[in-house]
Image (cartoon, rainbow, N blue to C red):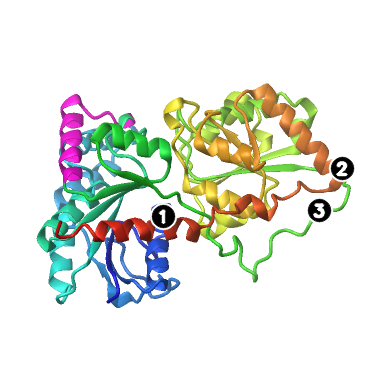
Amino acid sequence: MRPRLLIIAYVFPPSESVGARRPGELARFAADQQWDVRVLTATPADSDAPDAGIPEGRIVRAAPVPRSAQLVSSVRRAEARSRVGRRRLLTALGAIGREVLIPDACVNWVVPAVRQFLRTRDGWRPDVIMVTGPPASAYLVAARLARRLNVPWVADYRDLWTVGNDYWPYGRTPVRRAIDHRLERRLLRSASSCVTISEPLAEIMRSTFGIDTKVVMNGIDRQPAVTAEEPTSPPAPAAPASSTLTLTHTGRLNPGKRDPSPLLDAVALLGPDARRVNIVFAGEDNGVAQAATERAGVADSVTNLGEVSAEKSWRVQAEADVLVLVMWNDPRDAGTMPGKFFDYLRARRPILMLGHPNGIVADIIRSRNAGAVLSDPHQIADQLRTWLAEKDRTGRIAELPASTMDGLYREDQLARYLEILTDAAATRGR
């Protein structure tokens, strides 16, 4: 009898969200390994999207309860007011929402998700449930279904919840933090085990909640970064007289944490060579890149593409000379492993990481000669000069060797995941 797995993921293909990749690839891999896989998600179907890896009939797509009509009306009225008034109202609504929507704004998915799965399962019962978050509301769904069906469940943390770096910046009150932390502790008492993406994060979970926590990293997807029908830019000439070095950052930047200022300050230190450097930002335009650019005075060296599709993001990565990974320069970020890091490795371009020098990503970059880990503008400027000289000399920046990616492919990690789920399923009835 094939092992039966229910994956609960708020986002799932065809969503292009980075959070949809981990559950999507696990579903595909488990099905290929002859597991009987079902999925419960809030992401709607799209007939024009690529195959999700399992038959659509095995995916339960439960829509959240619609938002309050009164709240929507309030927001629309705010949009008709002045920009200042709209910003103040939305800020107030956001602050209220952070306090009353427990555990998060996706709590309106919990009841419809549980009800729709139970209504449509037709007698099917999993041997084990795997749920991935954020959002934390997904853990509520898993715990309720596990209790109702009397099956074990595994909590997958792509990012940590109440003990994570991204929980604190949102201005929650001490009362709200205490409620969330108690809720998380109570939920985890019913979980069979936890899985997260790095050993430092796993150790935080073990020491805080006393729960068995395993590590399964994200990984490199084998599909090409760009399609064959749309080739990347033609190769540069062998030895151009004056080359341009293109450094690309994709994804979100955060003020005070993921800040590109050290790189832009380094460009300003290059003097006349600054015009030979082009920094490309592709991601949500939240003003962080623009502010850093203006402070450094290097607007002529920056291109801001704004938010782009997943395919466009892969394309600009493939066409870059160097890829920029901006992380938080703080020891608390040592265990963070952005999914984007594996996209960068897939593009086989050297990586310039800005952030804490002793984190797990920094260790991989150094141990595999995949780029440079720097935060001081003067050191970054020296590295930029080295890359400029290489491009002047050879016409290109050498790509990373294929061996850099050994052991880091998605399937290398997912095989370990199935072992964890098998062990969890074996606890049923104990």
Q: Is residue 174 magenta?
A: yes
- Which kind of residue does numbered mark 2 sit on? Arg
Of residues 33 and 359, the one nearer the viewer is: 33
Front tag of 2 and 3: 2
Residue 254 location in percent, x, y? 45, 34
Q: Marks 1 and 3: CB-CB under 8 Å?
A: no
Residue 11 location in percent, x, y? 33, 57
Disc 2 marks which residue? Answer: 393
The residue segment tinted magenta is 169-189
In the rendered structure, the answer to whether residue 350 lies left or right of residue 235 reads: left
Of residues 110 and 98, the one nearer the viewer is: 110
In the rendered structure, the answer to whether residue 120 lies left or right of residue 277 reads: left
Can residue 181 be seen here?
Answer: yes
Q: Is residue 231 magenta?
A: no
Q: Quadrant of residue 197?
A: top left
Of residues 19 and 250, the one nearer the viewer is: 19
Q: Marks 2 and 1: CB-CB under 8 Å?
A: no
**Label 3 secondary element:** loop
Q: In which quarter of the image is residue 125?
A: bottom left
In terms of secondary structure, what is the magenta stretch mainly?
helix
